Image: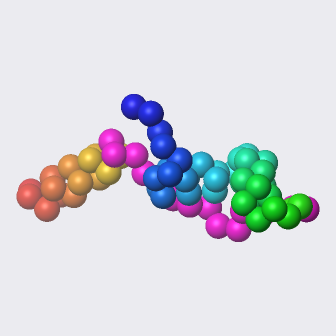
């Protein structure tokens, strides 16, 4: 499966990830046509994989149906 950065979730996950500040800085500079001195990611985004969500649902189902 190919990831498409046009997808909002993928876009946010990629650019908000610690360590990817240089990509975010480059993207914003190209978009705004201005030099950016510093990039700081203020809030860490929380994404869970589909597998993790399935496991959470499965655990909830088990606990509700005892």
Look at the image and tell me whether residue 21 can be seen. no
At a point 50% along the width and 51% down the height, the residue shown is: 6
Q: Which residues are magenta?
A: 37-51
In the rendered view, does 57 fall on the left or right side of 40? left
Look at the image and tell me whether residue 14 can be seen. yes
View extreme (front): residue = 33
View extreme (bottom): residue = 42
At a point 23% along the width and 54% down the height, the residue shown is: 57
At a point 85% along the width and 64% down the height, the residue shown is: 34
The picture places residue 12, in percent across and down from the top left corner, at 56, 57
In the rendered view, does 64 fall on the left or right side of 19? left
| Magenta stretch: includes residue 47 | yes
Q: Quadrant of residue 35?
A: bottom right
Nearer to the camera, 56 or 41 = 41
The picture places residue 25, in percent across and down from the top left corner, at 78, 55
In the rendered view, does 47 fall on the left or right side of 45? left
Magenta segment's dominant SS is: loop
The picture places residue 54, in percent across and down from the top left corner, at 26, 47
The picture places residue 40, in percent across and down from the top left corner, at 78, 63
Nearer to the camera, 3 or 18 = 3
């Amino acid at each position: 499966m190919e990831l498409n950065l046009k997808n909002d979730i993928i876009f946010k996950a990629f650019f908000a990830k610690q360590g990817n500040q240089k990509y975010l800085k480059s993207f914003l500079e190209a978009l705004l046509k201005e030099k950016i001195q510093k990039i700081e990611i203020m809030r860490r985004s929380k994404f869970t994989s589909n597998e993790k969500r399935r496991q959470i649902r499965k655990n909830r189902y088990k606990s509700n149906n005892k």
